[in-house]
Amino acid sequence: MQGYNVLMIYNKDMDKLLMCKRLRNPYKGLSNLVGGKIERGESGITAAYRELLEETGISDKDIVLHHLMDFKYYFQECYVEVYVGKLKYDVMVSGDENELYWSDLNKDFFDMSLFAGEGNIGHMIEQVKMSKDKIFTEVSS
């Protein structure tokens, strides 16, 4: 079963979420979270940090990622690991895979005409809201 990751990257104030505008299918033209493929023999967290650096220029010195949840798709024979992190400080993001931008959190992330993932982005954001005190308590350093 092929593994993928999705990375929810919040700015240091937790009022913006890093998004990308998809240039290719699936979801061409829609906004999505950054992420990618977990390579054979690679741990999920290692793949998450690798994809984050490749797609955004953000390194493990800038952020601590936390494993939030997984989605398993039996008929598509794949799974998606979801990681979340809050930047320690402002960073410049850059990538050539998709256009990157910081989204305000007052959007309807369940709107499938704007956002990829069949409403999953909205669901993940709600999960972070419900658990953010637990997730980010250890990130004070």
Image (cartoon, rainbow, N blue to C red):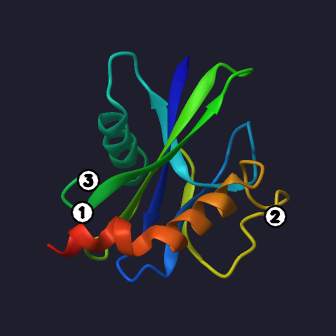
Q: Circle 2 is placed at which residue position?
A: 111
Residue 48 is left or right of residue 126, and the answer is left
Residue density around tag 1, few if under 14, some if 14–19, many if 20 or more, within 10 Å: some
Residue density around tag 3, few if under 14, some if 14–19, many if 20 or more, within 10 Å: some
Of the two numbered discs 1 and 2 on the same chain, state the one appearing first in sequence. 1
Is residue 96 among what the camera can see?
A: no
Is residue 46 among what the camera can see?
A: yes
Circle 3: element type: loop
Circle 2: element type: loop
Circle 1: element type: loop
The CA span between labels 1 and 2 is 30 Å
Percent coordinates x, y for residue 36 in the rendering: 50, 36
What residue do we see at 44% from left, 79% from top? 14
Identify which amino acid the numbered label 2 is placed on: Asp
Q: Quadrant of the N terminus?
A: top right
Percent coordinates x, y for residue 101 in the rendering: 55, 67
Q: Looking at the image, which residue sits at the far left?
A: 141
* Mark carried by residue 62: 1
The CA span between labels 3 and 2 is 30 Å
- Give the quadrant of residue 112: bottom right
Residue density around tag 2, few if under 14, some if 14–19, many if 20 or more, within 10 Å: some
- Give the quadrant of residue 21: bottom right
Tell me: residue 97, above or below residue 29.
above
Percent coordinates x, y for residue 32 in the rendering: 64, 54
Q: Circle 3 is placed at which residue position?
A: 59
Identify which amino acid the numbered label 1 is placed on: Asp
